[in-house]
Amino acid sequence: MIQIDEAEVLRRRPALDLVALMRQTFGAAANGAAGGAVRAAFTTPEATWFGAMPAWTGGARPALGAKLVVAVPANAARGLPTHRAVVVLFDPQTGEPSAWIEADAITGMRTAAVSVLATQALAARPVGVHAILGAGVQGRAHLDAFARGGMIEWVSIWSRDRTHAEALAKYALDLGIGVHVAETADDAVGAASVVSTCTASAEPLFDAASLVDGAHVNAVGACVATKRELPAALIGAASVVVDDLAAARAEAGDIVLAVNEGAASWDDITELGPVLEGHVEPRDGRVSVFVSVGLGIEDVAVAAAIASS
C-alpha cells in the first residue's frame, strides 16, 4: 500500500489534465460506468464533523475507494487547518488496499476543475471578466484552475477579510491577470460574466439583480442544507445544474432553501453529467448556475490518477 503526502500530490498535479479527467468521470457516471453513495456524515458533541464519500469509477482506469474528511472548527484558534482529508484506494479486482493519499489539495483542485468544466458547458461567455467571492483555499484553487484554462482576462475578488482578498489579488497579478479588490460582493459580481462563490456563508452574498443577464455562477461553498451563498430569487430565475441530484437534495442549501421558500422547483434542476453527454438540456434562465456539493467519484478519480502518475 503506497502512501502519498500533500507535497507529493502537488508535485504530481501539473502532469494531470484535471478538467479532462472530470469530463470523463461525469460522462462515465451519466452512462452508468461510475457512481457512489451520498456523503454519510455526523457531528460530534465537540462540533467535529466527519464525512465519508465512497465511490467507484470504471473505464480505462478503474478505481475504488473513499474520501474521509474531518472538519474541526476549533482548529482555527489553534492555528491548524479546519479541514483534513484522505482518500483510501482499493484494488477494484481483489479489494486489497492499494493507496492512502492526503486529500486536502485534491479537494480544492477537483472542485475547481469541475467548476471550469461546468463553465465551459453552461456559460454564455466563459472567457472574460471573472469574480471570485471568498479568498481561502477554494478561492485560490478556482483562480488557479481558470487561469490554467486561459479563461480569465480580468478578475474581481471579494472576501470578508480584506487581507485575504489582497493576498489572492497578489497571486492573480503574479499569474499576469488584471485584478480588482472589491468592497462588496455586489460590486464584485456587477461586471462579471463568470462568478465563483467559494465562501462559508450561511446567507446570500449578493442581490440577484447585481448579476448581468447571461452571467454564469459556480456555487461551491454551501454544501449543507441550512446554508446558502445565493439568493432564492436567483435560483428561481436561473438555469440550474447540479453535480448530482441525490446529493443536492440532501446538501445543496442554495437550492433546498429556495425550494422550501417556494422560489424554485426540483423539477427544473438538471445534472451536469447528462448535460455533458447530450442526454438532457437545462431549462432556459436569465443566468446559468452550477451548484456543487462535491462527489466521491471526483476524489477517487483524481486520487487514482495521482497514484498512477
Image: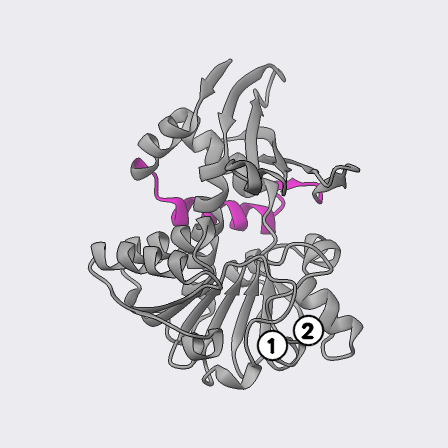
Residue under label 1: 283
Of 34 and 89, the residue lying toward us: 89
With 14 as the anchor, is 234 left or right in this view? right
Precedes in sequence: disc 2 or disc 1: 2
Q: Are marks 2 and 1 in contact (CB under 8 Å)?
A: yes
Q: Which mark is residue 54?
A: none
Query: Residue 269, image x and y in percent?
Result: 66, 68
How many residues crowd around disc 2 within 10 Å: few (fewer than 14), some, or many (20 or more)? some
Q: Residue at x 44, y 71 (%)?
A: 123
With 10 as the anchor, is 286 left or right in this view? right
Of 119 and 92, the residue lying toward us: 119
Give the alpha-carbon distance from disc 2 to disc 1, as whole Å. Answer: 7 Å
Residue 165 is inside the magenta segment: no
Per the image, label 2 sits on a secondary structure element best described as helix
Per the image, label 1 sits on a secondary structure element best described as loop
* Magenta segment boundaries in residue numbering: 15-38
Identify residue type, mark 1.
Answer: Arg
Q: Residue at x 45, y 77 (%)?
A: 215
**Residue 72 visible (yes or no):** yes
Identify residue type, mark 2.
Answer: Asp
Residue under label 2: 268
Corner quadrant of residue 212: bottom left
Q: Residue at x 56, y 20 (%)?
A: 91
